[in-house]
Image (cartoon, grey):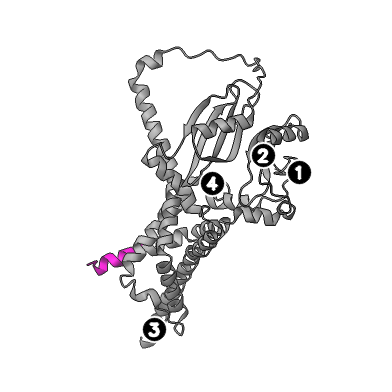
Amino acid sequence: MTSQRTLNRLFVLHSWAGIVTGLLLFIVCFSGAVVVFKNEIDLWANPSLAQLPRSDKPASLDAVLTQLHTRYPGATVETIALPDAVNPSYFAFVRERGAPASTRTKVALRSDTGAVVGPVDSQLGQYLRMLHVFLFFGPRWIVGFLGAAMLVLIVTGIVIHRKILAELFTQRWGRSFRVVMSDLHKSAGIWGLFFHILIATTGAWMGLAPLFEQGYKYVSTVNSNTSGTDAAKAPKPARKAAGDAAEPVRMQSLDALYATAQQAVPGLEARYVSMRRWGIDTAEAGFTGNLSDHLASTARVDINAATGVPRKVHDPRTAGFWSLVNGLMEPLHFGDFGGLALKWLYFLLGMTPAFLSISGTLIWLDARQQRRREAEAAGGGIAAAS
């Protein structure tokens, strides 16, 4: 049985954790609920794209790349997004000649012919995703920390409200603002409990796991460098002179490279094709996407685009337990694996933690004002008595 002293401490921890993170949690949770419809929002913000024809047999990747090079001569094509169940079109991210290194143009192309439609006017859905994942400009570990804070709020809330089942249907509408809001706060927390645990756990994992992984790699590298004296003495490969330019090399067919990627990872359904150092002997094409009939995401194959030989293959099904767990995090967090009905369910349940952050703050502020009024009343009574 939890003592009253422990409960009081947990209540203080719950209150201050909510107050400190409340605004950021609201932003992250609200944007996360909305960003479930990221692709639909982008189509809504660009009505002309929704009117483009959907092709049962989309144009080849080679045709798309040829159209892009024709329309944007001298530009660097960095990524091609393939049509999916929501978006009927190809999209490409292009860095035009003379543009700043950080500037990309998002271009839409017809799926049936690969013809360039033109730049995409609005990327509202992508902006919302950036707000949710990175708070626009911050590192992802900040959002991961908020997921961990949300887990703390969930655990302390469960312990504080010991009569959790009895409070499931408790709603005292005729009472004070703080009582009504407190009942709504508890009900929203209880009804969405399992969803909140899922979202907080997956969000914390995706934000913090890379941070711990980088730390582990750093420690491992330092240890290997201090112990491997022979490797330190080994001569480093000579660098090319600054004026040397890489010789242009003929690239393999993108469609042939995609076929190679599907052989390396059976069932790969590429969502994105990335191209790096295109046109030279170290060029790479990366195929990233989902696995057919499998929930895990982030399968990826990197292939040397000059030779057609795979350089790196990541299949969550065969890469070990933790890799499979990591591949499950994103689809479970964003709910993009079950169609429109699941998206609506994620949206409605995703709004509840946003409500909890606001209602918890209002309850805390109302309680603080109530204590201040009581202190003033007590002070006035003492003054009158004296």
Choose the circle earlier in sequence order: 2 or 4.
2
Task: Name the amino acid type tagged 2.
Answer: Phe
**Residue highlighted by disc 3:** 383
Residue segment shown in magenta: 1-13
Secondary structure type for disc 1: strand
Q: Quadrant of residue 111?
A: top right
Instruction: Indicate which disc, 3 or 2, sits on the residue closer to the N terminus.
Output: 2
**Contact, CB < 8 Å: mark 4 with mark 3?**
no
- Up/down of 232 relative to 43, above or below: above
Q: Amino acid at mark 3?
A: Ala
Q: Which comes sooner in the sequence, label 4 or label 3?
A: 4
Callouts 3 and 2 close, C-beta under 8 Å = no
Prevalent SS, magenta region: helix
Identify the secondary structure beneath mark 3: helix
Q: Which residue is mark 1?
A: 118
Q: Is residue 282 left or right of residue 72?
A: left
Above/below status of 3 relative to 134: below
195 or 135, which is in the foreground? 195
Residue beneath disc 4: 138
User: Label 2: which residue?
Assistant: 93
